Image (cartoon, rainbow, N blue to C red):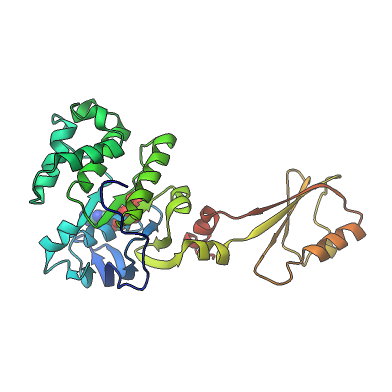
Amino acid sequence: MSIFPSSGRRRVSQPPIISVRNLSKTYASGFTALKNVKLDIQRGEIFALLGPNGAGKTTLIGVICGLVKASAGQVIADGHDIQREYRLVREKIGLVPQELHTDAFESVWATVNFSRGLFGKPRDPSLIEKLLRELSLWDKKDARIMTLSGGMKRRVMIAKALSHEPKILFLDEPSAGVDVELRRDMWQLVRRLRDSGVTIILTTHYIEEAEEMADRVGIIRQGELILVEEKAALMRKLGKKQLRLQLKTPLAAIPDTLAGYALELAGEGQTLIYTYDDQQDDTGIAELLRRLAAQGIDFRELQSSQSSLEDIFVSLVQGRP
Ligand SMILES: Nc1ncnc2c1ncn2[C@@H]1O[C@H](COP(=O)(O)OP(=O)(O)OP(=O)(O)O)[C@@H](O)[C@H]1O
C-alpha cells in the first residue's frame, strides 16, 4: 500500500507489539467483562478476535486503546505501558470504533485532516489524498459527512484512524453495515496495510471475514480468551471432514451393523453423511464403503466437504470443541 512505506511481512521472532498480561475488567455495575486475559499480538499480523455478543471484545479493545480502565493486569504496547505512557501509546494506535461518530457538517477532507492534527502531526495533504484515494473517498472529499452512505462513513472512520500513520490499527466490527462488494474492497485495503507493516486487530461477527483475512484467531467467551491459534492450524486441528453419499434408495434408519460409525441421515434418508478426522492415518472410509457394499447400500454420488471456521467457532463457543 502506498500510504506507508512497505516494510515486508512479519517476523515472528520479534517481541510482540502488544502484550496483554493478566487483564481483568469489572465494570462499576459489578459485571466482570474480562477475566485474566493473556494475549500477545505479533508485529505485522492480522489478528481476529471472535466472540458472541457481549463476550468482551469491545471491552478488551477499549482497555488496550486506553479508553477503558482495567481492574487488574497490564498492557504493554510497542514497549510502553498503556497507563503510565498513555500519550506515547495513543500515537501508535488507530481505532475504528463500532459506532460511527463523526462531525456530520464537516467535509470529509476537513475531518480527516483534523484527526491528524489531533495527534500533533504536521499537515500532510499528499498523505491524506493517498489515504482518501485508497479508500475510494477522493471524489467525496468535499462532501459533508451527513450526505454519505453508511459504508462511506465507515471508510471515513478508517481514514481518520489512519491519518496519523499508526503502527497498530484496531477495527471493531469493520464490516457492520458495509455491503459485500465494499467489504471485499476493505479486506484488500486491510491486507495492503498489513503488508506495509501495520499490525491489525479486528473484531468481527462475520466469521468469513476472519477466515478470509486473519493470520491468527482468538476466541473470547464470557470474558475469557478460550483459544488463540494460527488460523490455518486451527482449521487443520479442529476442522472435521465429511463425506456425503447420495443414496440410490433412501434409508429409513442407519442399519445397526453400521452403528459404530459417525453417520447421520439427511434429506429424507437420501443422503448419508460420514464425519471423520482426516488427521488420522485411517479415516475409516475404505472400510465403510466395503460395509455399505456388503449391505447392498448403493450410492449415486459421493462428495467430501470440510468444516468452516464458522462450524469450529460455533462448537467452541457452545463449549463442545
Ligand atoms: N460501561 C459498562 N458498564 C457495565 N457493563 C458493561 C459496560 N460496557 C460493557 N458492559 C458489559 O460487558 C460485557 C461485554 O461487553 P462488550 O461490549 O465488551 O462485548 P462485545 O464482545 O464487544 O459484544 P458485541 O459483539 O455485542 O459488541 C457485556 O455484558 C456488556 O453488557
Position in image of residue 236 (x %, y %):
57, 64
**Disc count in the image?**
0
- Lateral position of residue 8 relative to residue 318, left or right: left
Instruction: Examine the rendering and report whether any part of residue 202 can be seen.
Output: no
- The residue located at (37%, 59%) in the rendering is 47
- Lateral position of residue 134 relative to residue 209, left or right: left
Instruction: Examine the rendering and report whether any part of residue 188 can be seen.
Output: yes
- Lateral position of residue 20 relative to residue 318, left or right: left
Q: Nearer the viewer, residue 149 or 318?
A: 149
- The residue located at (51%, 53%) in the rendering is 310
Q: Quadrant of the C terminus?
A: bottom right
- The residue located at (90%, 57%) in the rendering is 293
- Lateral position of residue 141 relative to residue 184, left or right: left
62 relative to 117, above or below: below
Instruction: Answer with the quadrant where ligand 1 appears in the image.
Output: bottom left
Position in image of residue 54 (x %, y %):
34, 54
- The residue located at (33%, 69%) in the rendering is 39
Position in image of residue 294 (x %, y %):
92, 60
Q: Nearer the viewer, residue 243 or 55?
A: 243
Position in image of residue 288 (x %, y %):
81, 62
Looking at the rendering, which quadrant does residue 146 occupy?
Answer: top left
